Image (spheres, rainbow, N blue to C red):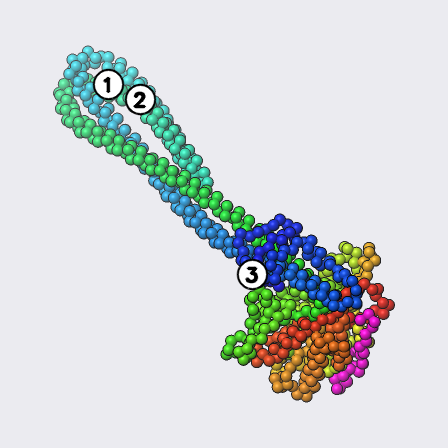
Amino acid sequence: MVGTATNGRMRQAFSIVNGEQELVPTSAPHSNAGSECGGIEFTREDVDALLNERMKYKNKFNYKERCDNMMDYIKRLRLCIRWFQEIEGCYLFEQEKLQNLLEFKESQCAEMELMLENKEEELNLIIVELRKSLSSLQEKVSKEESEKLAAVDSLAREKEARISIEKSQASLSEELGKIQGELQSANQRIASVNDMYKLLQEYNSSLQLYNGKLQTDLDTAHETVKRGEKEKAAIVENLSNLRGQHKSLQDQYALCKASLEEVTKQKDALVYEVASLRGELQQARNDRDQYLSQVNDLTARVVNCDELAVKSNELEERCLSQSKQLQTLQEQLEVAQNKLKVSDLSAFETRTEFEAQKRLITELQNRLEDAEFKLIEGEKLRKKLHNTILELKGNIRVFCRVRPLLPDDSPCAEGKVVSYPTTTEALGRGIDLLQNGQKYPFTFDKVFTPDASQEDVFVEISQLVQSALDGYKVCIFAYGQTGSGKTYTMMGKPGHPEQKGLIPRSLEQIFQTRQSLLSQGWKYEMQVSMLEIYNETIRDLLSTNRDSSRTENGTSGKQYAIKHDANGNTHVSDLSIVDVRSTREVAFLLDQAANSRSVGKTQMNEQSSRSHFVFTLRISGVNESTDQQVQGVLNLIDLAGSERLSKSGSTGDRLKETQAINKSLSSLSDVIFALAKKEDYVPFRNSKLTYLLQPCLGGDSKTLMFVNISPDPSSLGESLCSLRFAARVNACEIGVPRRHTIMRSADSRLSLG
């Protein structure tokens, strides 16, 4: 039973029972003052001692003393179970709290991821803007450098012209007197000047090559900058490299500028000398009148030189302003780099916090898994204690299953007629029926709601099925009205693996366990038989000549007799017994039996089972290493559904079938009443069904009953009768189950057990 923590109390001894370190939650609800357990706590030694305790009596014929001791022992077991239930509730509370905390941390993690994505987008935008600004800055720098070079060239030309004009004007008056004397040496100097002019041309071409080399170096530097921009991961380092390269280029530019100025000065001097020599040669060839006209022209050129000087000053101011703009752009670039560093630091801090949150979530998930594991272990121990109590009491266990509402069910104007209490004591075990405003509460060993799957149902009986391999007799039968889902619970829905019933799932588990026990030395032999009780007549569903043996009135030509031996085993004479070695063989036999079973259509069910179906699996096991032998029996029974003639509308053969079914179920009710009242005589022989089930109801078998009910409001009366009958079955005391370790007899005929 799984309960909430509303009425429980946190205990520390659960970890001691599991042999682990104490796990005390930070907060847990407190128990009521009236709890039966009070302050009692159990350790593993206490639980083992309680389970292994054997009754000692002074007088074995003093039944009162034995009964008192047994009641005291049962009371202590109940206290232990109650204590485990309280611990289970507290762990459920802790699990819910951890789950909420995990969801909260996951939402925080999602928010952090969203913030991180936004930061990354912002950084990408900043990087794109920085790239654009860097490219624009480079374009501006190259443009300004070209303009500056043009301005320097024009300024140099203007200075050259002004100097040449000033010197020529100053030397005109002095050279007028010397021209006559130097005219003779002019021819000699013309030859030397021509040689010098050739040397100057060669020097000028070498300067152009040097300038081209400088331009090539500048282009390679720009390509290096572009390659650095493409590397996003190393953008900060590349930017710093670019700054260093920019400084080195500036230094190179300054050196080139200085060397260019020196070359320009030399060139100006040589050009001036050539021009002066040419002027002297021209002046020597012309008369004085031409010299006078040249003086007038030079005067006009002086005026133009003054204007050029003004323009040169303006160009210098413009170059100065452009240098200031370049410095401003460099400062903006440094600010952008600082912003990028701050953004990288923020992203690193965000990622660090995100990783810390992920580690915290992982730790919470591990704690949640530990809590779930301890909860499962506690549930297993609770089931073991509960099974021990049932074995000591000898009660028949009862599970209740409510099928879902179907489209054909009639709606109820007053609301739901079936409800499930949510208290700690009744959670998962209680069911309430509401009829005419009155509530009828019932409590069973387990209650399955309509949303419970076939897997959920089988998990609860898997340990009981396992007992058959351990040498116990096990009987599971389904009871309920027609259309309540008995056949679906036992057989499932054909063609849908996820909706397999208890019979195919039990067989799969048994064959899987048999395979795993081979390593421990166990070898098992298994035999299967299937029969139905139709109109108080036994039919062999595995008979090869079954169809030919039927007579016209629906009875079988071969008569089968039920016999009980001294060991409590039940044999059906002449019944077909098949040795099986795999689930596939059993599945084939189940399909064969399903096709042979008697079914019919009524107003309550499209495919109604008109007979009681009994599946029997006999298991014989031998351990070659220990010479231990066990013999177990698994009986899985699908009873025909009870029905009212007014609702089923049965006539003819269906009427006879209904009467036979109701008679056998009435005999089953009489047997249950007699067992509940502990009467000396129990009418097992009143029907073939009760006589066949005698070892299950009054012997040493582990017996479980599934009571199936319908939530249809029109079936409320039948559901109430089924639950009342199930409550009486749950109160019956039968023999204590015992393990069978006898040798298999020479007669290998299968018994019902």
Q: Quadrant of residue 218?
A: top left
| Residue that numbered label 3 is attached to | 33
Indicate the amino acid at tag 3: Ala
Residue 342 as seen in the image, left or right of residue 389? left
Disc 2 secondary structure class:
helix
| Residue that numbered label 2 is attached to | 262
Vertical placement of residue 408 versus 256, above or below? below
Vertical placement of residue 482 versus 176, above or below? below
Q: Residue at x 46, y 49 (%)?
A: 112
Of callouts 2 and 3, the N-terminal one: 3
Query: Is residue 161 in view?
Result: yes
| Residue that numbered label 1 is attached to | 277
Whole-percent x and y of residue 357?
50, 48
Of callouts 2 and 1, the N-terminal one: 2
Q: What is the magenta segment's predominant secondary structure?
A: loop
Callout 3 crowding tier (Cα within 10 Å): few <14, some 14–19, many ≥20:
few
Residue 278 as seen in the image, left or right of residue 472? left
2 and 1 marks in contact (CB < 8 Å):
no
Of callouts 3 and 1, the N-terminal one: 3
Camera-side residue of 387 and 310: 387
Indicate the amino acid at tag 1: Leu
2 and 3 marks in contact (CB < 8 Å):
no
Indicate the amino acid at tag 2: Glu
Whole-percent x and y of residue 746?
86, 68
Whole-percent x and y of residue 742?
83, 64
